[in-house]
Image (cartoon, rainbow, N blue to C red):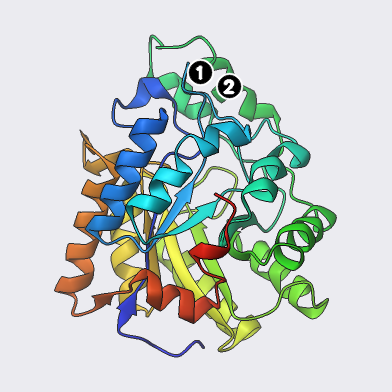
Protein backbone atom coordinates (compact mmCIF):
# COMPACT_ATOMS: atom_id res chain seq x y z
CA UNK A 1 0.00 0.00 0.00
CA UNK A 2 1.39 3.43 -0.90
CA UNK A 3 2.08 5.71 2.07
CA UNK A 4 -0.85 7.97 2.86
CA UNK A 5 -0.27 11.65 2.27
CA UNK A 6 -2.27 14.74 3.17
CA UNK A 7 -1.74 16.17 -0.32
CA UNK A 8 -4.01 15.29 -3.24
CA UNK A 9 -2.97 15.65 -6.88
CA UNK A 10 -5.60 17.25 -9.10
CA UNK A 11 -5.22 16.35 -12.77
CA UNK A 12 -7.38 18.13 -15.31
CA UNK A 13 -8.06 16.57 -18.73
CA UNK A 14 -8.91 19.55 -20.90
CA UNK A 15 -10.54 18.17 -24.05
CA UNK A 16 -9.79 14.49 -24.83
CA UNK A 17 -10.96 12.63 -27.90
CA UNK A 18 -14.40 11.51 -26.69
CA UNK A 19 -16.77 14.47 -26.63
CA UNK A 20 -17.60 16.43 -29.76
CA UNK A 21 -18.30 20.16 -30.27
CA UNK A 22 -22.08 19.70 -30.46
CA UNK A 23 -22.16 18.42 -26.88
CA UNK A 24 -20.92 21.58 -25.13
CA UNK A 25 -19.89 25.10 -26.14
CA UNK A 26 -17.34 25.00 -23.32
CA UNK A 27 -15.38 22.07 -24.80
CA UNK A 28 -12.05 23.63 -25.78
CA UNK A 29 -11.19 22.96 -29.41
CA UNK A 30 -9.27 26.04 -30.56
CA UNK A 31 -5.72 26.88 -29.45
CA UNK A 32 -7.02 29.98 -27.65
CA UNK A 33 -9.60 27.97 -25.69
CA UNK A 34 -7.11 25.25 -24.79
CA UNK A 35 -4.50 27.75 -23.61
CA UNK A 36 -6.94 29.91 -21.68
CA UNK A 37 -8.79 27.02 -20.04
CA UNK A 38 -5.55 25.22 -19.20
CA UNK A 39 -4.05 28.24 -17.46
CA UNK A 40 -7.31 28.86 -15.59
CA UNK A 41 -7.48 25.21 -14.47
CA UNK A 42 -3.91 25.44 -13.18
CA UNK A 43 -4.67 28.64 -11.31
CA UNK A 44 -7.70 26.90 -9.77
CA UNK A 45 -5.49 24.13 -8.40
CA UNK A 46 -4.71 21.54 -11.08
CA UNK A 47 -1.10 20.38 -10.79
CA UNK A 48 -1.29 18.27 -13.98
CA UNK A 49 -2.91 19.24 -17.30
CA UNK A 50 -3.67 16.26 -19.54
CA UNK A 51 -3.86 17.44 -23.15
CA UNK A 52 -5.10 16.30 -26.54
CA UNK A 53 -5.18 18.48 -29.66
CA UNK A 54 -8.13 19.41 -31.85
CA UNK A 55 -8.35 20.65 -35.41
CA UNK A 56 -9.35 24.28 -34.94
CA UNK A 57 -11.45 24.20 -38.13
CA UNK A 58 -14.02 21.65 -36.94
CA UNK A 59 -12.99 20.41 -33.52
CA UNK A 60 -12.04 16.86 -34.51
CA UNK A 61 -9.16 15.17 -32.63
CA UNK A 62 -5.84 15.44 -34.45
CA UNK A 63 -2.35 13.98 -33.94
CA UNK A 64 -0.70 16.89 -35.77
CA UNK A 65 2.23 18.24 -33.72
CA UNK A 66 1.54 21.71 -35.13
CA UNK A 67 -1.87 21.67 -33.44
CA UNK A 68 -0.16 21.03 -30.10
CA UNK A 69 2.45 23.70 -30.71
CA UNK A 70 -0.35 26.21 -31.28
CA UNK A 71 -1.17 26.14 -27.56
CA UNK A 72 1.44 24.23 -25.50
CA UNK A 73 4.05 27.03 -25.39
CA UNK A 74 1.32 29.35 -24.10
CA UNK A 75 0.36 26.84 -21.41
CA UNK A 76 3.99 26.45 -20.34
CA UNK A 77 4.48 30.21 -20.22
CA UNK A 78 1.20 30.86 -18.41
CA UNK A 79 1.40 28.35 -15.56
CA UNK A 80 3.61 25.95 -13.60
CA UNK A 81 1.45 22.87 -14.19
CA UNK A 82 2.91 19.63 -15.51
CA UNK A 83 1.76 19.13 -19.09
CA UNK A 84 0.79 15.52 -19.74
CA UNK A 85 0.49 14.74 -23.48
CA UNK A 86 -1.73 11.89 -24.62
CA UNK A 87 -0.40 8.80 -26.36
CA UNK A 88 -4.02 7.63 -26.71
CA UNK A 89 -5.06 10.36 -29.14
CA UNK A 90 -8.40 9.11 -30.38
CA UNK A 91 -9.89 5.76 -31.33
CA UNK A 92 -9.30 6.13 -35.07
CA UNK A 93 -5.57 6.91 -34.83
CA UNK A 94 -2.78 4.37 -35.33
CA UNK A 95 -0.03 3.99 -32.76
CA UNK A 96 2.30 5.80 -35.16
CA UNK A 97 -0.18 8.68 -35.31
CA UNK A 98 -0.45 8.74 -31.53
CA UNK A 99 3.33 9.00 -31.12
CA UNK A 100 3.92 11.87 -33.55
CA UNK A 101 3.33 14.74 -31.17
CA UNK A 102 4.80 13.37 -27.91
CA UNK A 103 8.01 12.26 -29.66
CA UNK A 104 8.50 15.78 -30.98
CA UNK A 105 7.35 17.54 -27.80
CA UNK A 106 9.22 15.35 -25.26
CA UNK A 107 6.93 16.34 -22.35
CA UNK A 108 7.49 15.60 -18.69
CA UNK A 109 4.59 13.14 -18.66
CA UNK A 110 2.47 11.20 -21.13
CA UNK A 111 -0.65 9.12 -20.70
CA UNK A 112 -0.27 5.40 -21.45
CA UNK A 113 -3.25 3.09 -21.92
CA UNK A 114 -2.49 -0.27 -20.32
CA UNK A 115 -4.49 -2.58 -22.59
CA UNK A 116 -6.57 -3.03 -25.71
CA UNK A 117 -10.31 -2.70 -25.19
CA UNK A 118 -13.72 -2.05 -26.67
CA UNK A 119 -13.96 1.71 -26.04
CA UNK A 120 -17.57 2.42 -26.91
CA UNK A 121 -18.87 5.94 -27.47
CA UNK A 122 -21.75 5.10 -29.81
CA UNK A 123 -24.57 5.47 -27.22
CA UNK A 124 -23.73 9.19 -27.05
CA UNK A 125 -24.88 9.60 -30.65
CA UNK A 126 -28.48 8.81 -29.71
CA UNK A 127 -28.69 11.88 -27.46
CA UNK A 128 -28.49 14.44 -30.27
CA UNK A 129 -30.80 15.16 -33.21
CA UNK A 130 -28.54 17.57 -35.08
CA UNK A 131 -24.80 18.12 -35.26
CA UNK A 132 -22.55 21.11 -35.57
CA UNK A 133 -20.13 19.22 -37.85
CA UNK A 134 -20.74 16.28 -40.14
CA UNK A 135 -17.85 14.18 -38.77
CA UNK A 136 -19.28 13.89 -35.24
CA UNK A 137 -22.05 11.30 -35.56
CA UNK A 138 -20.10 8.83 -37.77
CA UNK A 139 -17.10 9.15 -35.45
CA UNK A 140 -19.18 8.14 -32.44
CA UNK A 141 -21.20 5.39 -34.14
CA UNK A 142 -18.07 3.71 -35.55
CA UNK A 143 -17.04 2.76 -32.00
CA UNK A 144 -19.68 0.02 -31.90
CA UNK A 145 -17.36 -2.02 -34.11
CA UNK A 146 -13.82 -0.99 -33.23
CA UNK A 147 -11.09 -1.96 -30.81
CA UNK A 148 -8.80 0.56 -29.12
CA UNK A 149 -5.41 -1.07 -29.67
CA UNK A 150 -2.78 -1.14 -26.92
CA UNK A 151 -0.87 -4.42 -27.19
CA UNK A 152 2.04 -5.41 -24.97
CA UNK A 153 4.38 -4.59 -27.86
CA UNK A 154 2.72 -1.19 -28.31
CA UNK A 155 3.10 -0.41 -24.61
CA UNK A 156 6.74 -1.48 -24.55
CA UNK A 157 7.44 0.59 -27.66
CA UNK A 158 5.87 3.72 -26.21
CA UNK A 159 7.82 3.33 -22.96
CA UNK A 160 11.05 2.76 -24.88
CA UNK A 161 10.64 5.70 -27.25
CA UNK A 162 9.25 8.25 -24.80
CA UNK A 163 10.50 6.98 -21.46
CA UNK A 164 13.96 5.63 -22.14
CA UNK A 165 14.88 7.96 -25.00
CA UNK A 166 13.18 11.18 -23.88
CA UNK A 167 12.84 10.86 -20.11
CA UNK A 168 9.04 11.00 -19.98
CA UNK A 169 7.13 9.49 -17.07
CA UNK A 170 3.65 8.07 -17.50
CA UNK A 171 0.08 8.30 -16.31
CA UNK A 172 -0.77 4.59 -16.57
CA UNK A 173 -4.45 4.55 -17.54
CA UNK A 174 -6.16 1.40 -16.27
CA UNK A 175 -9.73 0.91 -17.49
CA UNK A 176 -10.19 -2.50 -15.89
CA UNK A 177 -8.57 -4.80 -13.36
CA UNK A 178 -6.77 -6.68 -16.14
CA UNK A 179 -4.93 -3.48 -17.02
CA UNK A 180 -3.43 -3.46 -13.53
CA UNK A 181 -2.09 -6.94 -14.20
CA UNK A 182 -0.76 -5.75 -17.57
CA UNK A 183 1.14 -3.03 -15.73
CA UNK A 184 2.45 -5.57 -13.22
CA UNK A 185 3.67 -7.69 -16.16
CA UNK A 186 5.54 -4.69 -17.53
CA UNK A 187 7.06 -4.10 -14.11
CA UNK A 188 8.19 -7.74 -13.96
CA UNK A 189 9.79 -7.33 -17.40
CA UNK A 190 11.61 -4.20 -16.16
CA UNK A 191 9.91 -2.17 -18.89
CA UNK A 192 8.33 0.15 -16.31
CA UNK A 193 10.24 1.37 -13.27
CA UNK A 194 8.73 2.74 -10.04
CA UNK A 195 7.50 5.08 -8.80
CA UNK A 196 4.61 5.04 -11.24
CA UNK A 197 1.35 6.94 -11.45
CA UNK A 198 -1.74 4.75 -11.86
CA UNK A 199 -4.95 6.37 -13.11
CA UNK A 200 -7.92 4.08 -12.35
CA UNK A 201 -10.75 4.77 -14.81
CA UNK A 202 -14.39 3.88 -14.28
CA UNK A 203 -17.56 4.17 -16.33
CA UNK A 204 -16.32 3.89 -19.92
CA UNK A 205 -18.42 1.37 -21.84
CA UNK A 206 -16.05 -1.53 -22.47
CA UNK A 207 -14.17 -1.00 -19.20
CA UNK A 208 -14.99 -1.49 -15.54
CA UNK A 209 -18.23 0.10 -14.35
CA UNK A 210 -18.59 3.02 -11.98
CA UNK A 211 -19.65 1.05 -8.90
CA UNK A 212 -17.96 1.84 -5.60
CA UNK A 213 -17.28 -1.85 -5.01
CA UNK A 214 -15.16 -1.77 -8.16
CA UNK A 215 -13.15 1.17 -6.84
CA UNK A 216 -12.32 -0.76 -3.68
CA UNK A 217 -11.45 -3.86 -5.69
CA UNK A 218 -9.14 -1.93 -8.06
CA UNK A 219 -7.40 -0.26 -5.11
CA UNK A 220 -6.96 -3.54 -3.23
CA UNK A 221 -5.63 -5.23 -6.36
CA UNK A 222 -3.14 -2.42 -6.99
CA UNK A 223 -1.96 -2.63 -3.39
CA UNK A 224 -1.30 -6.36 -3.79
CA UNK A 225 0.52 -5.90 -7.07
CA UNK A 226 2.54 -2.76 -6.43
CA UNK A 227 2.89 -2.30 -2.68
CA UNK A 228 4.33 1.11 -1.91
CA UNK A 229 5.81 1.67 -5.39
CA UNK A 230 2.91 3.58 -6.90
CA UNK A 231 0.86 6.77 -6.68
CA UNK A 232 -2.79 6.43 -7.63
CA UNK A 233 -5.64 8.56 -8.85
CA UNK A 234 -9.24 8.04 -9.92
CA UNK A 235 -11.46 9.36 -12.67
CA UNK A 236 -15.06 8.40 -13.32
CA UNK A 237 -16.72 9.25 -16.61
CA UNK A 238 -19.93 11.25 -16.57
CA UNK A 239 -22.15 11.74 -13.56
CA UNK A 240 -19.97 9.75 -11.17
CA UNK A 241 -17.05 12.15 -11.61
CA UNK A 242 -17.34 14.00 -8.30
CA UNK A 243 -18.65 11.12 -6.11
CA UNK A 244 -15.71 8.95 -7.17
CA UNK A 245 -13.30 11.83 -6.61
CA UNK A 246 -14.53 12.15 -3.03
CA UNK A 247 -14.18 8.40 -2.44
CA UNK A 248 -10.67 8.42 -3.85
CA UNK A 249 -9.60 11.19 -1.49
CA UNK A 250 -11.06 9.33 1.50
CA UNK A 251 -9.10 6.21 0.49
CA UNK A 252 -5.84 8.12 0.17
CA UNK A 253 -5.84 8.67 -3.60
CA UNK A 254 -5.77 11.59 -5.99
CA UNK A 255 -8.30 12.78 -8.57
CA UNK A 256 -8.77 13.65 -12.23
CA UNK A 257 -11.51 15.93 -13.53
CA UNK A 258 -11.97 17.85 -16.77
CA UNK A 259 -14.19 18.11 -19.83
CA UNK A 260 -12.57 15.04 -21.38
CA UNK A 261 -14.20 12.94 -18.66
CA UNK A 262 -17.47 14.77 -17.97
CA UNK A 263 -19.13 17.80 -19.54
CA UNK A 264 -21.23 18.57 -16.47
CA UNK A 265 -20.77 20.40 -13.19
CA UNK A 266 -23.96 19.05 -11.61
CA UNK A 267 -26.95 16.99 -12.69
CA UNK A 268 -28.28 18.45 -15.95
CA UNK A 269 -25.98 21.49 -15.88
CA UNK A 270 -23.08 21.78 -18.30
CA UNK A 271 -19.79 22.97 -16.84
CA UNK A 272 -18.77 26.41 -18.05
CA UNK A 273 -15.08 25.48 -18.13
CA UNK A 274 -12.48 23.03 -16.93
CA UNK A 275 -11.60 25.42 -14.12
CA UNK A 276 -15.14 25.19 -12.75
CA UNK A 277 -14.68 21.44 -12.24
CA UNK A 278 -11.26 21.97 -10.64
CA UNK A 279 -12.73 24.53 -8.23
CA UNK A 280 -15.49 22.10 -7.25
CA UNK A 281 -13.19 19.14 -6.66
CA UNK A 282 -10.74 21.34 -4.76
CA UNK A 283 -13.58 22.37 -2.47
CA UNK A 284 -14.38 18.70 -1.84
CA UNK A 285 -10.72 17.93 -1.09
CA UNK A 286 -10.30 20.83 1.32
CA UNK A 287 -13.65 20.23 3.01
CA UNK A 288 -12.48 16.69 3.75
CA UNK A 289 -9.37 18.12 5.44
CA UNK A 290 -6.77 17.54 2.74
CA UNK A 291 -4.46 19.86 0.82
CA UNK A 292 -3.87 20.04 -2.91
CA UNK A 293 -0.46 19.08 -4.27
CA UNK A 294 1.50 21.73 -6.13
CA UNK A 295 3.27 21.05 -9.42
CA UNK A 296 6.56 21.08 -7.49
CA UNK A 297 5.18 18.41 -5.13
CA UNK A 298 4.23 16.19 -8.07
CA UNK A 299 7.55 16.67 -9.85
CA UNK A 300 9.37 15.54 -6.74
CA UNK A 301 7.00 12.65 -6.01
CA UNK A 302 7.15 11.17 -9.52
CA UNK A 303 10.73 12.07 -10.35
CA UNK A 304 9.84 14.21 -13.35
CA UNK A 305 12.54 15.83 -15.45
CA UNK A 306 11.16 19.37 -15.15
CA UNK A 307 9.58 21.89 -17.50
CA UNK A 308 12.97 23.14 -18.72
CA UNK A 309 13.69 19.75 -20.34
CA UNK A 310 10.65 19.65 -22.67
CA UNK A 311 10.75 20.62 -26.37
CA UNK A 312 8.05 23.30 -26.48
Residue 168 in view of the camera = yes
In this rendered view, identify the residue nearer to me: 171 or 169.
169
Task: Identify which residue is drawn at 40% across, 12% down.
Answer: 132
- Which labelled disc corresponds to residue 136? 1
| Vertical relation: 112 (above or below) 239 | below
**Left or right: 33 with respect to 177?**
left
- On residue 46, the disc is none
Which residue sits at x=37%, y=44%? 238
Q: For the residue labelled by badge 1, is the local secondary structure a helix, a strand or a loop?
A: helix
Residue 177 lies in what quarter of the image? bottom right
The residue nearer to you, when weighing 292 against 74, is 74
Q: Which residue is mark 2?
A: 139
Give the image quarter of residue 309.
Answer: bottom right
**Element type where label 2 sits in the image:** helix
x, y percentage for residue 106?
Answer: 63, 55
In the drawing, does residue 112 fall left or right of residue 69?
right
Q: Does 46 appear above or below 277?
A: below
Q: Is residue 174 visible?
A: no
Q: What residue is rendered at 20% in x and 56% in y? A: 279
Amino acid sequence: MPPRTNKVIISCALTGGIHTPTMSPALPVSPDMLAEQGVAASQAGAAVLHVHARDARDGRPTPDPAAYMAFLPRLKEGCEAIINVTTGGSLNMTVDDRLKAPVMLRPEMCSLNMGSMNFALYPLADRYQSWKYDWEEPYLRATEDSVFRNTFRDIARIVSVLGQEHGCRFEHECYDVGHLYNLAHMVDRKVVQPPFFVQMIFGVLGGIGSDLANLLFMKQTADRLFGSDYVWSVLAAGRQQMPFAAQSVLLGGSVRVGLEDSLFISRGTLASSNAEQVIKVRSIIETLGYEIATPADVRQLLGLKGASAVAF
